[in-house]
Amino acid sequence: MLALALRFLATVLFSVMLLLVKLTGERDIALPETLFWRQALPALAIFGWLAARGEVARLKTKRPWVHARRALIGGTGMFLTLGVVRILPLAEATVLGFTTPMFAVILSALMLKEHVGPWRWTAVIVGLIGVLIIAGPSTGNLPLFGVAVGIGAAFMVALVTVQVRDLGRTEEPLTVVFYFSAMSAPFLGLFLFSTRMDHDLTGWLMLAGIGVTGLFAQITMTASLRYGTVASVIVVDYIQLAWATFWGWLVFSHMPPVSTWIGAPVIIGASLLIVWREHVLGKRRKAAAALEPG
């Protein structure tokens, strides 16, 4: 229940962060600058909080290179995830993110040489059909470039999920979040020299809001994977579509077209099939391990 509650809170915070990202885009605030503050503020906040409590030692890690790899892949994924929000409406950008479990299946087959049966391959095909329904040329409402960015973001998130799960076995959520932010912020800071930073108070408050909501969204999402399995918490992620639709309607007066209402359940159903199948296979592996001698 704690894992589910943390994951639900993460969906709320993440949806607010994406809303603020889209609003900063409409104010012509450059995406690299938005990313910089998204990463720099959490790193400073975590370090300052631990320093005030005399607990900086909690950041000690024996896996710096794993954190660095996670920062590289996660930073790329964040660039695409926040970038697609500026290209597509919030609901459509969110739906494309739900293709992550499908890419996880493909990656497990290609990289981990894991056997993937007909159930999961069928789910991958069905999910791709859902993407085609949403982005098909007959709808004429989504740019293909935006769809490609959204799919690329989902692919990178699939890579990150595996790494976060691995790091969560030895590192506390605060440590994982700190190194992700601290290692990527200096690189993003290089782009500040070519971006405009003379914002009004509203612009600065939006950037601060992105950093704060992003920090707590990441902590709660990482913590949910520490206290629960991916299969047990990922279902909650689909609530984010409701939030995205609500913010899109309330702030931008946008309601998803019919193609999105048809394609979204197809994609969600396919990803839920993958989660269910992973759960079944996990139970079988545990049962088989329990029967092994010794």
Image (cartoon, rainbow, N blue to C red):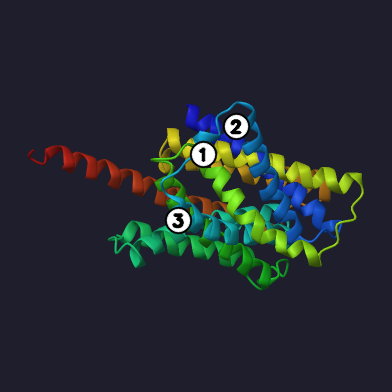
Q: Quadrant of the C terminus?
A: top left
Residue at mark 1: 59
In this image, 33 relative to 51: left or right? right
- Residue placed furthest toward the left: 293
Residues marked 1 and 2 touching at CB (< 8 Å)? yes
Residue drawn at x 71%, y 59% is 189
107 or 52, nearer to the observer: 52
Residue at mark 3: 65
Kindly tell me whether residue 286 is visible in this rendering: yes
Mark 1, secondary structure of its residue:
helix
Measured Cα–Cα span from mark 2 to mark 3 = 22 Å
Residue drawn at x 45%, y 59% is 102
Mark 3, secondary structure of its residue:
helix
Q: Position of residue 145 (x, y in %)?
A: 67, 72
Residue at mark 2: 50
Q: Which mark is residue 29?
A: none
